């Protein structure tokens, strides 16, 4: 036999071996079909298949980070917003992800977009801005229920950004400013009320004990004297004289 024939035979053997020997990494599984029938998931490691009889489909088991495109939604209180999100999911059943759905990544993306529009359309704007964690949990639960038959586990869905129209932003800013002014006025009124209560209590004490009024008067004189004034004129209260006259 000529060297060319030996070379052809060696090449055919190598091709046959490459079609027979399969290596599946740790993060993948090989779904094996034999004559069109599902045999099962293989791997990780090295195994052999029958050429032209078996077909192997590899499935990645790692977590997929998928951006949910920006969706325009109308909230329950008729406010138009644009929302984008991110979803984290992975394949937990390789056989179902191949047999039950044509493209599990694309299918998960489509169901995520639809669910975001539906869930946010049933929520009010205040809930969307202040209770985002609650909405994230709701989105995760609903999307996971839809993808479970496909062997896909959705672990987390997070709303990343909520975009509002410029007019709505101005209205919200005006509302926030009015709320701050309201709180400031309440705090100021509360302080005035507490100060009035304290003054009333102090007046009652001074009315019962006239000596406290005289002590307060003397303290005021002391404070005035520290201002380094060259001339100091102060009135002399009658009550102070009357106190000494009574003692005399």
Image: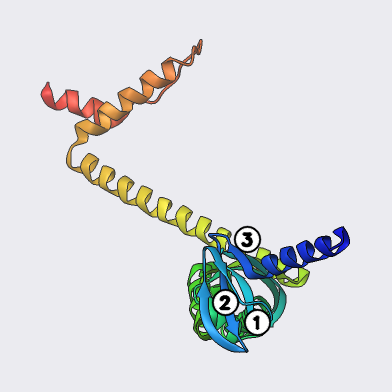
Question: What residue lies at 60% left-to-right and 80% top-to-bottom?
Answer: 120
Position above or below: 117 against 243:
below
The answer to whether marks 3 and 2 mark residues whose Cβ atoms lie closer than 8 Å is no
Quadrant of the rendering where the C terminus is positioned = top left
Residue 140, how many percent across, how many down? 51, 75
The answer to whether marks 1 and 2 mark residues whose Cβ atoms lie closer than 8 Å is no
Q: Earlier in the sequence, mark 1 or mark 3?
A: 1
Residue 198, how many percent across, how many down? 31, 46
Residue 148, how many percent across, how many down? 50, 82
Q: Which residue is mark 2?
A: 31
Q: Could you tell me which secondary element the residue under label 3 belongs to? A: helix
Q: Which residue is mark 1?
A: 107
Mark 2 Cα-neighbour bin, 10 Å: few <14, some 14–19, many ≥20: many
Measure how far apart labels 3 and 2 are at the Cα level. Answer: 61 Å
Measure how far apart labels 1 and 2 are at the Cα level. Answer: 19 Å
Position above or below: 83 against 236:
below
Q: Could you tell me which secondary element the residue under label 2 belongs to? A: strand
The reply to whether residue 21 is in sight is: yes
Q: Which residue is mark 3?
A: 177
Q: Could you tell me which secondary element the residue under label 1 belongs to? A: helix
Comparing labels 1 and 3, the label whose residue is closer to the camera: 1
The answer to whether marks 1 and 3 mark residues whose Cβ atoms lie closer than 8 Å is no
- Camera-side residue: 167 or 97? 97
Q: How is the image coloured?
A: rainbow
Mark 1 Cα-neighbour bin, 10 Å: few <14, some 14–19, many ≥20: some
């Amino acid at each position: 036999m000529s060297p060319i024939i030996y070379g052809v035979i060696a090449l055919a053997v190598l091709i046959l071996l490459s079609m027979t020997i399969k290596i599946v990494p740790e993060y993948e599984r090989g779904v094996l079909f034999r004559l069109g029938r599902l045999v099962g998931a293989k791997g990780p490691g090295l195994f052999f298949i029958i050429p032209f009889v078996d077909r192997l489909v590899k499935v990645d088991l790692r977590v997929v980070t998928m951006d949910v495109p920006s969706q325009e939604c109308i909230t329950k209180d008729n406010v138009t917003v644009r929302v984008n999100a991110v979803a984290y999911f992975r394949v937990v059943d390789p056989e179902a992800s191949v047999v039950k759905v044509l493209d599990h990544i694309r299918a998960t993306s489509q169901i995520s977009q639809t669910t975001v529009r539906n869930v946010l359309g049933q929520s009010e704007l205040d809930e969307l801005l202040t209770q985002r964690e609650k909405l994230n949990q709701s989105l995760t639960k609903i999307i996971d229920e839809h993808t479970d038959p496909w062997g896909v586990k959705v672990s987390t869905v997070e709303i990343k950004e909520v975009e509002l129209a410029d007019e709505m932003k101005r209205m919200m800013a005006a509302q926030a400013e009015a709320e701050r002014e309201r709180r400031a006025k309440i705090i100021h009124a509360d302080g005035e009320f507490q100060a009035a209560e304290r003054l009333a209590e102090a007046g009652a004490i001074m009315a019962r004990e006239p000596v406290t009024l005289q002590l307060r008067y003397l303290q005021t004189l002391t404070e005035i004297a520290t201002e380094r004034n060259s001339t100091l004129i102060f009135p002399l209260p009658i009550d102070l004289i009357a106190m000494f006259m009574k003692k005399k």
